[in-house]
Image (cartoon, rainbow, N blue to C red):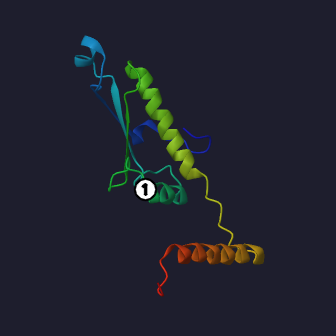
Amino acid sequence: MDSEIVIPESELVERFVRSSGPGGQNVNKVATAVELRFDVARSTVLPEDVRERLLARRDRRVTTDGVLVISAQRFRTQERNREDARARLAAFVAAGAEAPKPRVATKPSRAAKQRRLDDKRQRATVKRQRSPSRWD
């Protein structure tokens, strides 16, 4: 799949099901949609750091058991849907392969602090002028 990580066929489970949506008479007879399953939690080819990043993502395609389920039914042929599912799997793994940039802690500048306080003061003045006076 990825240039570094190659997922063997033995770790992929494909199931062909009927597609939903329009398609004429063909849609009721031919199972063109593909459901591709890849067990991220028990995969032998994924490095540990990549596995942890993929499982930590809040992706609804990953089950609680750590199995990625990709459903592809964009195309009318089984073969195109298989390719689509595998491309999406490759994109998912590639996203987990790149390490996130470490966050660099910064502080607001003195001018930014001053602008914030000035804005707060101005807002407070506007709100004070809106409310009726207590001495009326």
- Foreground: 98 or 47? 98
In this rendered view, identify the residue nearer to me: 118 or 8.
118
- Taking the image as shown, residue 93 lies to the left or right of residue 11, namely right
Q: Which residue is mark 1?
A: 58
Q: Residue 87's x, y, as percent?
A: 50, 34
Residue nearer the viewer, 44 or 114? 114
Measuring from the top left, give residue 12's x and y in whole percent: 40, 39
Residue type at tag 1: Arg
In this view, 19 is above or below 124? above
Which picture quadrant has residue 80? Answer: top left
| Left/right of residue 22 with respect to residue 97 in the rendered view | left
Name the secondary structure under disc 1.
loop
Residue under the image location 70 percent in, 77 percent down: 113
- Res. 107 in view: no
Q: Looking at the picture, how far across and down is residue 73, in whole percent? A: 37, 28
User: Label 1 crowding class (10 Å Cα cut-off): few <14, some 14-19, many 20+?
Assistant: few
